[in-house]
Structure formats: C-alpha cells, structure tokens
Image (cartoon, rainbow, N blue to C red):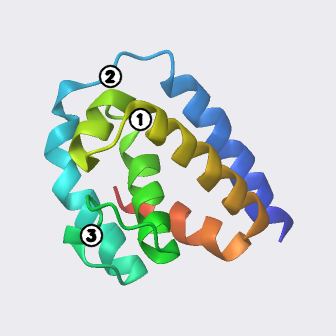
Amino acid sequence: MCDIYARLREMEEVLSHYQDLPRRRTGEAFVPEVKRMVCSEFGVAEDVLCARCKHYPVALARMVCYYLLWPRMSMPQIGQQFNRHHTSILNGLHRLKEKMRGDPELAERVIRLKQLM
C-alpha cells in the first residue's frame, strides 16, 4: 500500500515539471485515443463524456481524461474538447488527485493508463 502512495508522490513530482514546459499543440490528436482508453477501462460510453451527465462513473472517467491530457494540452484546450470551462478542468484535476489519495485501486488504474500513453 505504501508503494501506491510513493508512486503517487513520484507522479506529482513529474507533473510539477510539466507545468514549466510549453504545451504541445499536437495534444488534440490524442483526445480520441485517451477517450477510448478511459471509456474502455471505466465502462462508460464515449458520447456521455462531453454531455452534462454528473453520474459518478461518468464524472470519474471524465476527470481521468483531464488528468491524462493535461501534460499535453492547456486547461482551456481540454475544456473545449469536453464542453467545459477551464476552471472545471482544474477542479476535476484536484478532485481526482484527492480521490486517488484515498483509493489505491483507482490510483493504480490511473497509473496503468498513464503508462499506456
């Protein structure tokens, strides 16, 4: 269990380095791939990711998409892809981080998806 938290801290450290790098404009090309991967992992239909649906499984899958896309795209760009304001993306990233701290299984799933990218 300590390994999960150690990996999570390592991921946060790596992500902090991404904040200083310029965002690549090619991030939009990865959106369909990320959506497919996340929907497959979490059992959610792709079309509901951009809908106003707030059911937990859909919201969780959406937040994982934000998390996987963020190093490659800016928050406003991610927001455009999901019909959301950039502040919703920021909130989703914070919420997912907290959920991952409290749920090692979720953290492991997200880490696995991150490694597949």
Q: Is residue 27 visible?
A: yes
Return the disc, 3 or 1, that comes first in the chain's sequence.
3
How far across and how far down the image is residue 12, in percent?
65, 40
Contact, mark 1 vs mark 2 (Cβ under 8 Å): no
Q: Tell me the residue at 26%/58% (across/down).
A: 50
x then y, percent, for residue 81: 22, 44
Dot 1, how many residues are within 10 Å of its Cα: few (below 14), some (14-19), or many (20+)? many
Q: Amino acid at mark 3?
A: Val
CB within 8 Å, label 3 to label 2: no
Mark 2: few/some/many CA within 10 Å (<14, 14-19, 20+): some
Residue placed most toward the observer, 101 or 11: 101
Residue under pointer 3: 48
> In the rendered structure, which amino acid carries the disc numbered 1?
Pro
Q: Mark 1 or mark 2, which has the lower sequence index? A: 2
What is the C-alpha distance between the residues marked 3 and 2? 27 Å
Which residue is labeled 1 in the image? 71
Residue at position x 47%, y 32% in the image = 87
The local secondary structure at tag 1 comes to loop
Q: Mark 3 packing: few (<14 Cα in 10 Å), some, or many (20+)?
A: some
- Left or right of 30: which side holds 58? right
Image position, residue 56 (x, y; %): 52, 73
Residue 76 vs residue 101, the one in the foreground: 76
Q: Which quarter shows the N terminus? A: bottom right
Q: Percent x, y for residue 14?
A: 59, 35
The numbered dot on residue 23 is 2
Please tell me whether mark 3 or mark 1 is closer to you in this view: 3
Seen in the image, is 12 located left or right of residue 89? right
Residue 115 appears in view: no
Q: Quadrant of the C terminus?
A: bottom left
Residue at 78% across, 53% down: 6
The quarter of the picture where residue 78 lies is top left
Sequence-wise, the earlier of marks 3 and 2 is 2
